[in-house]
Image (spheres, helix red, strand yellow):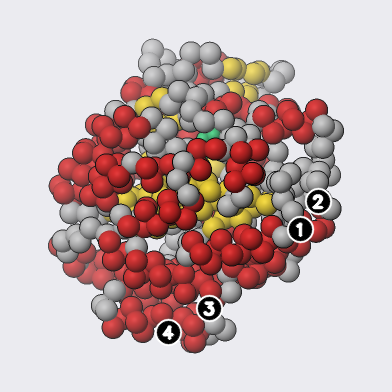
Amino acid sequence: MRAEGIETVRRILCVFPRYTSSFGTFEYSYPLTDGVQAFMPPQGILLIAAYLPENWPVRFVDENIRPASTEDFEWAEAVFVSGMHIQRQQMNDICRRAHAFDLAVAIGGPSVSACPDYYPSFDYLHVGELGDATDELLARLARDPSRPEQQVVLKTADRLDMTRFPIPAYELAEVKRYFLGSIQYSSGCPYQCEFCDIPGLYGRNPRLKSPQQITAELDKLLECGVTGSVYFVDDNFIGNRKAAVDLLPHLIEWQKRTGYVIRLACEATLNIAKRPEILAKMREAFFVTIFCGIETPDPDALKAMQKDHNMMVPILEGVHTINSYGMEVVSGIIMGLDTDKPETAEALLAFVDESRIPLLTINLLQALPKTPLWDRLERENRLNHDETRDSNVDFLLPYDEVVSAWRKCMEVAYQPEKLYARYQYQVDYTYANRLKVPVTAEQKSWANIKRGLIMLGNIFWKVGVLGDYRKVFWKFALSRLRHGDIEGLISSALIAHHLIMFARAASVGQQNASNYSLRLREASVPAE
Ligand code: SF4
């Protein structure tokens, strides 16, 4: 549904801020693609854009693709911004630029919802999810679009039921410019891992869209030109197991109807390995990747962070079970935990070798507001607000020791030989178990072949000829070419290149040790 009952017309400019360079956004892969410039279409701000009254003209600018221009700001009557903590500096910069045009600026999304204090310059703070605060914001702008004298804070008390959410305005985004498509089925998670802000922000009882909404969104993503993979951004795809079971037959039908042109990916807790009936359906729906927050292979650490559900099956067994359904596991790992010991880095590297997981996001522990971890560290006087550090946690081990252990893990885990060996394992023992999907007319189309050729050309030239790890690359590439697996070659080489390049920068201190780090290395987009 859209906001209703508003006659006055307002022109709204929605701006999504740039990301600070991070491990999880794959920017080193972009130059190998056919023109990708950004990670995923942002769900939140495209949802708000779709919710605006039908007669309100709206523009969307993702500053990861291009900066909002003078003409955009001159066109607009008000500006909406949304983002995560890591984009805080960039969001404040957008506000400053909009104010230069005397425009009212509203901010919503996860960062402001957790920390309204981070955004003192904005005119409107939209705290919480889509709901009565959104209606109030639109009503106020309809009455008067000028900047209010004082900051106005609007908090959602009554959330809009997710079954009434409109389809995000994907048509405003240049979907082809994104590395992945994105979609959201549920919000919230029943668990309470100590470091995680999801239950605090979105609740423990997951709210849901209907399966019909999801297939309609997938249709729209296809219409808008999505190719490759679509990622379910839900914090835990099996947060409500019954809902996942209800959705999967619809996804299977959708894949059959549209010819399996899209691969699916999601985030889920590792205990999904205990649900063979769900894994089997996911395989049929052509899920190829699951991000699992394994966090640490140390059972004592899992217990301490209240992530016991990761121990419902032995971790390596869980990973191999998921692999046996054709799904690659991507793993979140945290270093700097209170249970870490001097030998933690060695144990972690042994786990990387044994699990054969190619992609592990290894981060330093960061305390997020609205988490039990934050509250505990505050009580223990262990929150450190020095923004030059890679973490706001005073670790029990010396800070320098923890950071150098992180750098060592990045350096060793992503040595090209080791990484490509893990990919070769995935080819042999995971990808081999995937659903054999029919070759469709769309896959044989000239547009698709051209896209593949461009990416192959980029990979062969930039990695196979100019790259300093070309020998390792060619060993893997020639074996893939012999098997006619061009798609497997492209997807592995794209990701591997990012991991290798990012890890090299990280191991010499040129990248943040946490996706949430307050240390913002990248200058914000300059004003035009
Ligand atoms: S299972 Fe995942 S989403 Fe849920 S509380 Fe733990 S870390 Fe957060």
Distance from the alpha carbon under mark 1 to that under mark 2: 8 Å
Mark in front: 3 vs 1 = 1
Question: For this rendering, which residue is in front, 479 or 430?
Answer: 430
Distance from the alpha carbon under mark 2 to that under mark 4: 41 Å
Determine whether label 1 and label 2 are within 8 Å by CB. yes
Determine whether label 4 and label 3 are within 8 Å by CB. no
Q: Which mark sits nearer the N-terminus, 1 or 2? A: 1
- Compared with 314, 382 (above or below) is above
Name the element at disc 1.
loop
| Mark 3 Cα-neighbour bin, 10 Å: few <14, some 14–19, many ≥20 | some
Residue 189 in the image, given as x and y percentages of width and height: 48, 30
Label drawn at residue 342? 1
Question: For this rendering, which residue is in front, 285 or 156?
Answer: 285
Label drawn at residue 417? 3
Label drawn at residue 475? 4
Q: Which mark sits nearer the N-terminus, 4 or 1? A: 1
Is label 3 within 8 A of ligand 1 (CB to nearest ligand atom)?
Answer: no
Q: Amino acid at mark 3?
A: Glu
In the displayed structure image, the side of residue 161 where residue 191 appears, left or right? right
Label drawn at residue 397? 2
Instruction: Write down the quadrant of residue 386 in the picture.
Output: top right
Question: For this rendering, which residue is in front, 144 or 30?
Answer: 30
Mark in front: 2 vs 4 = 2
| Mark 4 Cα-neighbour bin, 10 Å: few <14, some 14–19, many ≥20 | few
